[in-house]
């Protein structure tokens, strides 16, 4: 329930760990890089498996299948099979999936806006520590 100000009610600190645990479970599924890229690839409408794979890029067929199944289970995408030979399958964002677009797009905009600053921080860190490894 929202307070009169319209802002979300603060989470009581006594229940913070419980709230974090619940959020962690959901974020682990919807916040991984493949789910984010799939949401973005489906933002314009339904796509076939091969179209999603091309749009996402380096994802393996197995990982795409697993991620789409997980997203379907979570209510983020629907899978529609057309009775053709061979069968045609399309995936589409649900209302819940579309609601994920706003935070995903905001995170992407933040990443683009801060890319140079992050690269500079990484270079400073690597120079100070002698660590030339790139994080994957």
Image: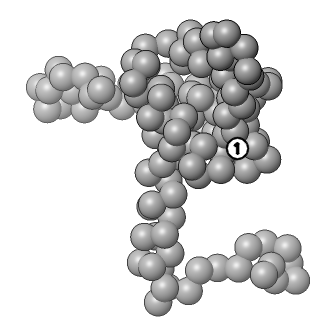
**Residue 56, image x, y percentages:** 54, 18
Residue drawn at the location 43% of the way across and 19% of the way down: 61
Viewer-closest of 111 and 42: 42
Give the residue furthest to the left: 130
Would residue 113 be visible to someone looking at this image?
A: no
Q: Quadrant of residue 82?
A: top right
Give the residue furthest to the bottom: 14
Viewer-closest of 115 and 77: 77
**Residue 96, image x, y percentages:** 73, 50
Q: Quadrant of the C terminus?
A: top left
Q: Quadrant of residue 108?
A: top right
Name the residue beneath numbered marker 1. 97
Residue drawn at the location 45% of the way across and 79% of the way down: 18
Residue drawn at the location 70% of the way across and 44% of the way down: 97
Viewer-closest of 2 and 81: 81
SS state under label 1:
helix
Q: Quadrant of the N terminus?
A: bottom right
**For mark 1, does the 10 Å Cα neighbourhood hold few (<14), some (14 to 19), or many (20 or more) residues?**
many
Vertical order, 84 against 122 (above or below): above
**Residue 70, image x, y percentages:** 51, 44
Residue drawn at the location 11% of the way across and 25% of the way down: 130
Left or right of 62: which side holds 126?
A: left
Left or right of 29: which side holds 54?
A: right
The count of marks equals 1
Vertical order, 19 against 93 (above or below): below
């Amino acid at each position: 329930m929202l307070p009169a100000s319209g802002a979300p009610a603060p989470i009581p600190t006594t229940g913070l760990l419980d709230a974090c645990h619940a959020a962690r479970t959901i974020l682990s599924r919807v916040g991984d890089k493949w789910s984010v890229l799939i949401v973005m690839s489906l933002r314009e409408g339904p796509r076939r498996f091969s179209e999603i794979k091309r749009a996402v890029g380096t994802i393996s067929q197995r990982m795409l299948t697993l991620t789409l199944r997980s997203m379907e289970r979570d209510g983020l995408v629907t899978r529609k099979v057309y009775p053709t030979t061979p069968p045609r399958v399309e995936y589409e964002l649900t209302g819940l999936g579309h609601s994920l677009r706003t935070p995903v797009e905001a995170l992407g905009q933040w990443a683009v806006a801060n890319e140079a600053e992050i690269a500079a921080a990484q270079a400073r860190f690597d120079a100070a520590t002698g660590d030339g490894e790139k994080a994957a």
